[in-house]
Amino acid sequence: MSTAALAQAATDNGGPVGLSEAIAFWILGPMALAGALGMVFARNAVHSALWLALAMLNLGALYMAQQAPFLGFVQIIVYTGAVMMLFLFVLMLVGRDSSDSVVEVIKGQRLAAAVLGIGFVALMVGSLARALFSVTPIGLGAANGVPSGNVAALGRLLFTQYLFPFELTSALLITAALGAMLMTFPHTRTTAKSGQRATVEARLRGARVSPLPGPGVFATANSVATPALLPDGSVAPESLSEIIETVPPSAPAPLAPVDAHALVGADHAKSDRISSGEEAQP
Amino acid sequence: MTPTYYLLLSALLFSIGTVGVLVRRNAIVVFMCIELMLNAVNLSLVTFARVNGGLDGQVMAFFVMVVAAAEVVVGLAIIMSIFRARRSSSVDDANLLKY
């Protein structure tokens, strides 16, 4: 039984497309196309990112259908997992509402781009259809190796024939990480950082030695938008903030007729409450 | 059905990415279109590996993924620093070298 299955697996080297793979292709391929089109036509950049994630997921599944399970999983983990989340992260940093403007800067640019795209599609599809439809695929059954599988075969190839390029990618990744760190480092300071002594001297030579008055937080308003009042009742101009709209100071409200419970002692209030509770019970 | 349909899908995705690069003006979306083009090429590499019966195409696709990851990191860092300097992520605003 198992030998028969193995023999069938050995003969079925995955070259020609079977029925199940064809079904998978005609489901996943249009979904990948829809993701790509949605990415180009979505007005909001976050929607574009989500459409692209859909397209990449479907491409990963298509890799798995084509005897490349390792690449399929790497596609899902690296692209839809890491790269797209990095894109979304930067989108959120840059500003989610930074949608495209509809104004055409170059006249007829969209029309020219569409014509070029359609022409490119016609060229590629025509040449591919003419050149490659009669090709019979060999399939990866022998290359993947029946006992070891795709991952082991890829690893063997990477660490023997492609060892030097593989080592070079490490240099590439380290360079990219260093470059990204350098480029996003905020080196916008143009003047030297002033020390404590310089700060003190500048303050003593300046017009005002003392710190600026804080906002007036009264009993009526606990907002920092309330300005501080000078002893004569006028507003201290230094206490006004430049970025907060100032609320005019309101006079404290006149004392309302207070609840009697607030004036009597705690014991009285408690006994009063207990007695009223007893009254409330029928 | 032959694996050539995969190549047709790859060509379609690649040209959609090209049109997106030409049409969109948000730098991040342009960058996403470039990612889509890289993915389309990866699909054709995987298909060629299957047609030729060797794993070299899959190794190439693997290297393309590594390079694409490095490219995303550097490109997004460039977009971030441009956004810091100009407060905009539109490719029309970065035109200091134009004249």
Image (cartoon, rainbow, N blue to C red):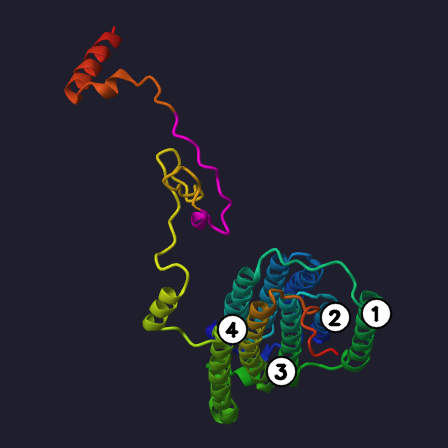
Q: Are marks 1 and 2 on the same chain?
A: no
Q: Are marks 1 and 4 on the same chain?
A: yes
Q: Return the x and y of residue A55 as percentages of the image width and height.
A: 63, 64
- Quadrant location of residue A202? bottom left
Q: CA distance from mark 1 to mark 4?
A: 36 Å
Q: Amino acid at mark 2?
A: Leu
Secondary structure type for disc 4: helix
Q: Chain of mark 3?
A: B
Q: Are marks 3 and 2 on the same chain?
A: yes
Of circles 3 and 2, the one toward us is 2
Q: Chain of mark 2?
A: B
Give A118 or A127, whichever is nearer the viewer: A118
Residue denoted by label 2: B22
Earlier in the chain: of badge 1 and badge 4, it is: 4
Query: How many other residues sit within 10 Å of disc 4, few (<14), some (14-19) or many (≥20)?
Result: some
Q: Are marks 1 and 2 in contact (CB under 8 Å)?
A: yes
Give A277 or A37, whichever is nearer the viewer: A277
Residue denoted by label 4: A74
Residue denoted by label 3: B49
